Image (spheres, rainbow, N blue to C red):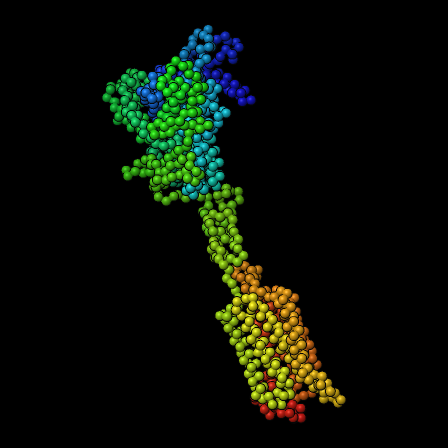
Amino acid sequence: MQLTLNLILFVSMLWMAGICPAACKTNLVSCRLMAEPQLPGLIMNGDFVIGGIFSIHSYLRYEQNTYTTQPLQLQCSGSMVFRELRLSRAMEFAIHEINNRTDLLPGITLGYEMHDSCAAVPMAIKVAFQFANGIERFFNDSDSCSKYGAAAVPALVGESGSTPSISMARILGLFGIPQVSPYATCACLSDKRQYPAFFRTIPSDHHQAAALARMVKHFGWTWIGAVRSDSDYGNNGMASFLKAAQEEGICVEYSEAYYRTQPRSKLERVANVIRRSTARVIVAFLASGDMRILMEELVRNPPPPLQWIGSETWITDPEFLKFNMCAGAVGFGVPRSVIPGFREFLLDLTPAKALKSPWLTEFWERSFSCSLKGKTGARECDGSEDIRALQNPYTDTSQLRITNMVYKATYAIAHAIHGAICNDTQCDRTIKLSPLQILQQLKRVNFTENGFPVSFDSKGDPVAVYELINWQLKKDGALDFMTVGLYESSKPRGQEFSMNRAISWMGGQTDVPVSVCSESCPLGTRKAVQKGKPICCYDCIQCAEGEISNRTDSLDCIHCPSEFWPNKRRDSCLPKPVEFLSWDSTLSIILTAFSVAGAIMALSVAGVFYKHRTSPIVRANNSELSFLLLFALALCFLCSLTFIGEPSGWSCMLRHTAFGITFVLCISCVLGKTIVVLMAFRATLPGSNVMKWFGPPQQRLSVLAFTLIQVLICILWLTISPPFPLKNLKHYKERIILECGLGSAIGFWTVLGYIGLLALFCFVLAFLARKLPDNFNEAKFITFSMLIFCAVWITFIPAYVSSPGKFTVAVEIFAILASSFGLIFCIFAPKCFIIMFRPEQNTKKHLMGKVPSKAL
């Protein structure tokens, strides 16, 4: 399939060039030229003639053919590109230099034959066929086609542009004629299946595009504009750049294409897009001619200041230094060089020498506005013209970049010829050299010339080395090129750049310009892409509760570890504050005061009872159980202190077991007192001796038995699954509640349930005995105390479950204190009042109801 396409292309190219072999024209027996051949602009004979093709003029025009009526005569016109003329003379200089050397091609004279392509594909194709067939004129139809069998040149230097080079490379590749381009950078030319004979001394745009994308990323520009030449060079180069930019996370606001031959309306549209854009950085992958026209259009109505990023075609072109809007432009250019003797060679031009070449003649006449050939109406050159006084791209040798590429390309071909016909001592000029031999030798060349290494990889490309060029303002206000860094593709990724000088940005500012669709998201936020817009356009959303982002432009927020919580800015995780009922808190101090006061009160009552232990009221109310109850109440008050402070393994086990045991001891004593009251009234009935079954020993045993049951429950609880310190991370997200885990919830509720069961039983018995006849019926006070006790602990359960954090412990302490105070006030307060303030009632007669009681 590929061979068929190549054959079709080849035949069509032949027809365009006006040359047709007999094999493809069945009605003709001989060959004839359909158009006059293109005459060279610079020519010199030699043992081996190297071809050259340069874009000396900027436009192509068609002229009527002298021999036919078909408009096939192609002529270059328009202004002369002095820079391209300098490139052609660099090839001429290199060949003269080679011919004067004794170590390279000794005894061999190289010649040259250079043509003008005027940067147009038709002319490039025509010249390519001339290089393949020769330029002899044939006027006799009987001339044989066999005269076209041998190639006119074994190799050639050129073309400068990528699009003409592509067309030439397809043709020359069919003949195996190697083409070494100094300036065609399209990455597509690295495809050896399509362009097997193409080489170049300038790096491929693949490397330049990658370098530009990494530079844009390096300076933090994520929102850029892009404009390119609508040609193979621009389209392929921009495609490579956009692919690399996408991989670097760079967004392109617009990507416009323009070619200098397109209608002006297209140019105006592209310029207006640039003017209206919000991107402050623009990447221009433009050929010099397209860039010049675009600049001239933008100057008419300048856009806001832009940071221009240029490709190597125009970033080092002195012609653009006149556009001040490009001040601060940055781009990659091939390394600058110095070619010894080259400037003297360029300036060694006289009218007599200029007349030997149509190019030099035109250059002289255009530069000095005079005529060397005595044209009518033009001033004749009189010899007073001084070429050294000229200041134009031809005489400017301060930036020999592409010129050096031509120099290297010429030397590469010379080395290839040397490898094909020379041995260690001499060269054989009689060898019939074929282009395929040069092609094979070019693949192996490896030398250093003028300090620059020259070699080609398997794709025909050199190692990519670029200088980072910056347009900086000089003291006089003029723009000039400054090399501020170096890019070497052979170095490891991340180390390709090396900066050696500060960059001056647009408008002469020293700070890096900002070009983003959206400002960077600060720490503590994440990016949320705006619907329907590129990924570089986004909103900054604060991280959700419990999440942070510790870098700018974070795509996602990360959760803090379970024991950490974000700070206010949500850019770092801090340890969560640990909350527990500490000793130094106000609440703890108050509760401690009440606990100690309660214990002191219980001990004080015990002291009063002990002092008046022989009094009737103390003896009548079972003094032994009363002292035991007061002791238990003192322990109840003090056990609340175990709930204060940082929970530990021992404190967690102590607080619950101490609370459970002391309260059972307390309730057991109250229950014993209640039973004693009931039994006492039963004993007053005739024939009853019930008190002998519930005397002091039985009372002590009952209290002990009831308490031992709770002790056994606590032992089982501590053995199977004891309480333990617990970091509660669920109740509050932003802090840790340090509390005591129950271990076994069954154990905890069994302890509480047993206390509640005893309290309920005691309440029932006291309630039944509340109306027994007596001036001082203790059952009434026990009933009130149990009522308060049960009310406190019934309300405690929902409060305990729903209270948050340290307040859970506070509720538990409050329940202990409230129930304890209820017991001590209801049971002992009336007795203490009588003992202290109503001693007249502290008599046996009064207690037996024989003296009328007074209202209290």
Q: Is residue 663 left or right of residue 515?
A: right
**Viewer-closest of 681 and 731:** 681
Residue 620 percent across, percent down from the top left? 64, 88
Residue found at x 48% / y 41%: 249
In the image, residue 325 above or below residue 732 = above
Q: Quadrant of the N terminus?
A: top right
Image x and y of residue 744, in percent: 63, 65
Q: Quadrant of the C terminus?
A: bottom right
Compared to 70, does 335 lie above or below? Answer: below
Q: Residue furthest front?
A: 424
Q: Is residue 65 above or below residue 796?
A: above
* Residue depicted at 71% across the width and 85% down the height: 692
In terms of depth relative to the viewer, which is nearer, 32 or 130? 130
Q: Residue at x 53, y 61 (%)?
A: 736
Asked whether the viewer can see residue 310, the reply is no
Taking the image as drawn, is residue 796 in sight?
Answer: yes
